[in-house]
């Protein structure tokens, strides 16, 4: 279970340049962030790049990070923002005929696949890919990131009502997609 | 059952694990990024006990001292090894009359320099000093201004808008120790020794055009303490004072510049207001005057182990009582920072403190004190073990002890 007190102490130490604290933060949240990123971008390699970049940026920004606040939500928001930026860059590239250009600049590639997904996550990721991004983001940030609708509204720059609507539609579509898959698998 | 519950259950079952090899590769990258951001040159500025409360002012003093020493150091070097029309004694004599000096220390890769203003007494010793440290040189707590006034040290953390005033007698001890290592007479003697041993090579270029600076290049030879390192000094041909020192380090067969120190405004009197931050910081700045406060706990008759445990226990007791003023005297953080950090946590019980053990290689006066506390947060009770809490002797003369860090 996540301990906010532990996070506060970790942040305290991290701001004082503790490598051990950063190591602990990494170990504590990397799988949560990978799962979230896979759910949002539905591509494992991109998800890995996003999470890697988030951790690298986090490591470089001890001075800017406030001691107050929720560490997990901070990291979750970093992942969401980075993915949004990447999507925006990709759309810009596509608009000027640079299809296929990766908008994400990942500092360095890992030697091999980092994230290993179980079957449920593969199914979830595939289902997520079939719903609009804004709905996908609302569902994942609320359910996986523990963000409030208000916090998601701030990220998406829309009203809380809009976020709640996106969340409801997203849930309904996901349920329909996942039920359909289950029925197909069982021959139903 | 609601659709959301179905989806949540499905999401809960979805899981990711990580490949240990890739995991380590990413972690190494992350840690390297942290190390790079922190910058080794600013390691001494990390807000440990020494840096926040004491060492930072000293570091700046030491930095200034290094420059001053470097000036004399190279003068000495040239005198011994590079006879030319330019006479070392001319600079030594000119340097003796310096009362005020403005120093800019540029590190390659950073636009903003570290900057200092020094006032010397008639005895040639630093009397007052002001230093500006930019964000890059102080990545943890942000830009800071430090003034050493002999009796007190003032430090203004601009990002936190916090002015801290501490007794100067504590850092002065370290200052003296630092100056002993950097005393120009000692350093010059050392260099003379190096020169006699043939460990440095110097080249003097004195242009015929007397408006152009005299340039002296000093190269440390193999077997010296800094083999391959090179320093290039420019000297004003008229005043015989050093105007710049450029530092180079060999890399891939070439000399790469590391820094450039500019020595400016020789003997231009510095406004005394520059050496007092109390009227300079914003009126709404948090002021933490520790100059009349004894930081840490006096050791008395306690053993090192006993006083370390007592400090740690008293710190958590203060947090438990929400007495952040008292807690702030035991750790290098102001009451406001402690309240921000621990205000949302209700400490219920100190389960255990200690035993304290000496930290190897720390000079015997740093102790590790493991602590376990029980707390309540968000209506839930839990406990946590703070491993690696370190308590150290604050001042040998005062024999007081304080928490250095909650762990590394």
Image: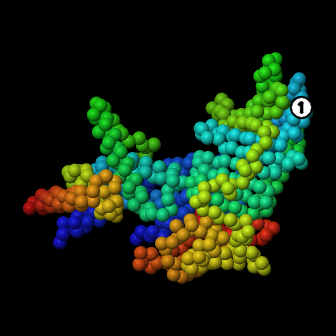
Q: Position of residue A92 (x, y in %)?
A: 31, 36
User: Is any atom of residue B248 visible in this view?
Assistant: yes
Q: How many marks?
A: 1
Q: Is residue A25 left or right of residue A18?
A: left
Crowding at dot 1, Cα within 10 Å, few <14 / some 14-19 / many 20+, comes out as few
In this picture the colour scheme is rainbow
Nearest to the observer: residue B158 or residue A64: B158
Q: Quadrant of the C terminus of chain B?
A: bottom right
User: Is any atom of residue B224 visible in this view?
Assistant: no
Image quarter for residue B404? Answer: bottom right
Name the residue rendered at 29%, 65% in the picture: B12
Q: Position of residue A52 (x, y in %)?
A: 43, 50
Q: Where is A141 relative to B302, above or below? A: above
Q: Position of residue B397 (x, y in %)?
A: 81, 67
Q: Is residue B251 left or right of residue B121?
A: left
Chain to which mark 1 belongs:
B
Name the residue rendered at 47%, 49% in the picture: A57
Nearest to the observer: residue B198 or residue B130: B130
Name the residue rendered at 60%, 55% in the picture: B282
Name the residue rendered at 24%, 54% in the picture: A135
Nearest to the observer: residue B64 or residue A117: B64
Nearest to the observer: residue B75 or residue A151: A151
State the residue lying farthest toward the left.
A188
Q: Where is B171 relative to B96, above or below? A: below
Q: Secondary structure at mark 1?
A: helix
Q: Position of residue B80 (x, y in %)?
A: 89, 33
Q: Where is B309 relative to B199, above or below? A: below
Image quarter for residue B13? Answer: bottom left
Q: Which residue is mark 1?
A: B90
State the residue lying farthest toward the top.
B208
Q: Quadrant of the N terminus of chain B?
A: bottom left
């Amino acid at each position: 279970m996540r301990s906010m007190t532990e996070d506060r102490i970790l942040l305290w130490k991290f701001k004082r340049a503790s490598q051990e604290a950063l190591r602990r933060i990494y170990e504590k949240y990397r799988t949560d962030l990978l799962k979230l990123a896979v759910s949002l971008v539905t591509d494992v390699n991109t998800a890995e790049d996003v999470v890697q970049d988030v951790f690298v940026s986090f490591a470089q920004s001890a001075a800017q990070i406030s001691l107050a606040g929720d560490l997990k939500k901070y990291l979750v928001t970093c992942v969401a923002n980075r993915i949004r930026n990447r999507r925006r860059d990709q759309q810009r590239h596509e608009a000027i005929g640079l299809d296929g250009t990766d908008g994400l600049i990942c500092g360095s590639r890992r030697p091999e696949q980092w994230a290993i997904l179980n079957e449920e996550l593969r199914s979830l990721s595939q289902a997520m890919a079939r719903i609009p991004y804004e709905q996908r983001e609302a569902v994942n940030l609320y359910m996986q990131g523990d963000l409030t609708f208000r916090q998601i509204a701030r990220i998406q720059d829309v009203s809380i009502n809009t976020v709640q609507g996106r969340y409801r539609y997203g849930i309904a579509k996901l349920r329909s997609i996942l039920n359909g898959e289950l029925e197909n698998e069982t021959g139903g | 059952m609601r659709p959301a519950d179905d989806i949540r259950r499905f999401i809960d079952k979805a899981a990711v694990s990580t490949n240990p090899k890739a995991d380590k590769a990413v972690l190494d990258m992350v840690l390297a990024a942290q190390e790079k951001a922190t910058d080794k040159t600013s390691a001494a500025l990390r807000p440990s006990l020494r840096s926040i409360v004491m060492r930072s002012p000293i570091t700046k003093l030491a930095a200034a001292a290094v420059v001053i020493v470097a000036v004399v150091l190279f003068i000495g070097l040239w005198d011994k090894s590079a006879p030319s029309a330019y006479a070392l004694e001319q600079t030594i004599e000119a340097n003796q009359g310096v009362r005020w000096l403005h120093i800019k220390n540029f590190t390659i890769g950073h636009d903003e320099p570290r900057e200092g203003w020094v006032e010397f007494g008639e005895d040639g010793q630093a009397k007052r000093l002001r230093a500006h440290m930019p964000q890059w040189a102080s990545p943890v707590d942000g830009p800071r201004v430090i003034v050493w006034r002999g009796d007190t040290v003032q430090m203004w953390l601009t990002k936190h808008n916090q002015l801290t005033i501490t007794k100067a007698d504590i850092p002065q001890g370290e200052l003296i120790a630092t100056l002993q290592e950097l005393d120009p007479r000692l350093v010059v003697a050392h260099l003379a020794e190096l020169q006699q041993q043939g460990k440095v090579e110097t080249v003097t270029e004195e242009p015929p055009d007397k408006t152009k600076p005299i340039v002296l290049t000093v190269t440390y030879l193999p077997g010296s303490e800094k083999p391959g390192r090179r320093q290039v000094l420019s000297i004003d041909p008229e005043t015989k004072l050093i105007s710049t020192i450029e530092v180079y380090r060999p890399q891939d067969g070439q000399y790469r510049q590391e820094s450039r120190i500019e020595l400016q405004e020789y003997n231009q009197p510095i406004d005394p207001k520059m050496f007092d931050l109390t009227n300079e910081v914003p009126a709404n700045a948090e002021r933490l005057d520790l100059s009349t406060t004894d930081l840490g706990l006096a050791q008395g008759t306690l053993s090192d182990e006993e006083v370390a445990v007592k400090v740690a226990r008293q710190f958590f007791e203060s947090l438990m009582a929400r007495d952040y003023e008292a807690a702030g005297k035991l750790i290098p953080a102001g009451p406001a920072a402690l309240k921000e950090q621990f205000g949302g946590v209700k400490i219920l019980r100190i389960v255990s403190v200690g035993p304290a053990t000496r930290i190897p290689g720390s000079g015997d006066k740093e102790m590790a004190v493991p602590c376990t506390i029980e707390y309540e947060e968000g209506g839930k009770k839990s406990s946590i073990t703070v491993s690696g809490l370190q308590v150290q002797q604050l001042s040998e003369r005062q024999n007081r002890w304080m928490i250095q860090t909650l762990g590394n």
